[in-house]
């Protein structure tokens, strides 16, 4: 149950697009289309942004999108806004009814 | 509306036990799988445990297996986490989380309760 690998930080200017990667192994990300993404604002509980790789829950902006290729999942935020500044976590099914999170990525909007 | 309210956190000495509770409201609790997820201070999220909607199956992270026990009371809409033999590395905010679907889609989170393991 090793954590998925995410970049510690990414940054972008308002209006730009950024992508956060989430690298796993054949034990989780590559084997299952069960990847979700969470946004965590300071001192708040995480919020679901993407599930099952590329599905958006009701109420989440269509500026957020997800994808997966092989053992890497990605979260893309287009039209970056100041309110998007937060920590982002990926999450994957890891087999045997267990779950693993990524280490988290801090997004800074310049 | 859906609410998950954790309680039971606090300061506990290494080696001792503590039980966390989560009271759910605003949805049919007995229809959902439930999880505990924790976050050490300044660190990332770590999945802890899952319990099936009917309590029939339970699974744990390797880091807590054999020390923590997840349980639920569907008649009272409550989720519990009994934590034994606590270690300093168990210090974290513990979140009660509702699973929407497929084990990794968590649509509602509680506000969290802080557990500090320290002598």
Image (cartoon, grey):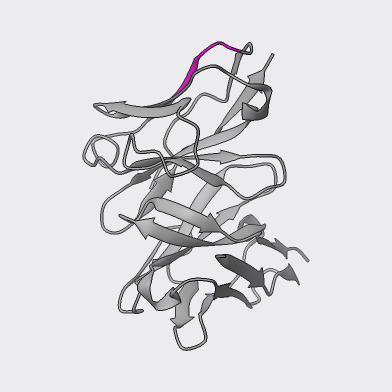
Question: As rendered, which of B98 and A27 lies closer to the eye?
Answer: B98
Q: In which quarter of the image is residue A101?
A: top left
As drawn, is A25 to the left or to the right of B119?
Answer: left
Magenta stretch, residue numbers: A15-20
As drawn, is A85 to the left or to the right of A65?
Answer: right
Q: Quadrant of residue B114?
A: bottom right
Question: As rendered, which of A36 and A31 lies closer to the eye?
Answer: A36
Question: As rendered, which of A102 and B96 lies closer to the eye?
Answer: B96
| Whole-percent x, y for residue A61 in the image | 50, 32
| Whole-percent x, y for residue A36 in the image | 40, 41
At x 40%, y 47%, the residue is A100
Question: As rendered, which of B38 and B25 lies closer to the eye?
Answer: B25
Give the residue at the far bottom of this rendering.
B75
Q: Quadrant of the C terminus of chain A?
A: top right
At x 57%, y 55%, the residue is B38
B96 versus A32 height, above or below: below
Q: Is residue B61 visible?
A: no
Q: Quadrant of residue B86?
A: bottom right
At x 62%, y 50%, the residue is A45
Q: Is residue B63 visible?
A: yes
At x 57%, y 25%, the residue is A8
Residue A17 falls inside the magenta stretch = yes
Query: How many marks do you count on the picture?
Result: 0
| Whole-percent x, y for residue B91 in the image | 66, 58
B108 versus A57 height, above or below: below
As drawn, is B4 to the left or to the right of B98?
Answer: right
Residue B37 falls inside the magenta stretch = no
């Amino acid at each position: 149950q090793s954590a998925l690998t995410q970049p510690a930080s990414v940054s972008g200017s308002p209006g730009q697009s950024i992508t956060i990667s989430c690298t796993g192994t054949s034990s989780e990300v590559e084997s299952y289309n069960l990847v979700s993404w969470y946004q965590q604002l300071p001192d708040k509980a995480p919020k679901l942004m993407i599930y099952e790789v590329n599905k958006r829950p009701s109420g989440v902006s269509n500026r957020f999108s997800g994808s997966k290729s092989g053992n890497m999942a990605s979260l893309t935020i287009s039209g970056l806004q100041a309110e998007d500044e937060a920590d982002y976590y990926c999450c994957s099914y890891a087999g045997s009814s267990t779950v693993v999170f990524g280490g988290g990525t801090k997004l800074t909007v310049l | 509306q859906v609410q998950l309210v954790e309680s039971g956190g606090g300061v506990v000495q290494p080696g001792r036990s503590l039980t966390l509770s989560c009271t759910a409201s605003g949805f049919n609790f007995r229809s959902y799988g439930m999880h505990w997820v924790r976050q050490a201070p300044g660190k990332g999220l770590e999945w802890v445990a899952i319990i099936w909607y009917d309590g029939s199956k339970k699974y744990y992270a390797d880091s807590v297996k054999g020390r923590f026990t997840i349980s639920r009371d569907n008649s009272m809409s409550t989720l519990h986490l009994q934590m034994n033999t606590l270690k300093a590395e168990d210090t974290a905010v513990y979140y009660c989380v509702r699973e929407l679907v497929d084990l990794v889609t968590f649509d509602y989170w509680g506000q969290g309760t802080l557990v500090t393991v320290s002598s």
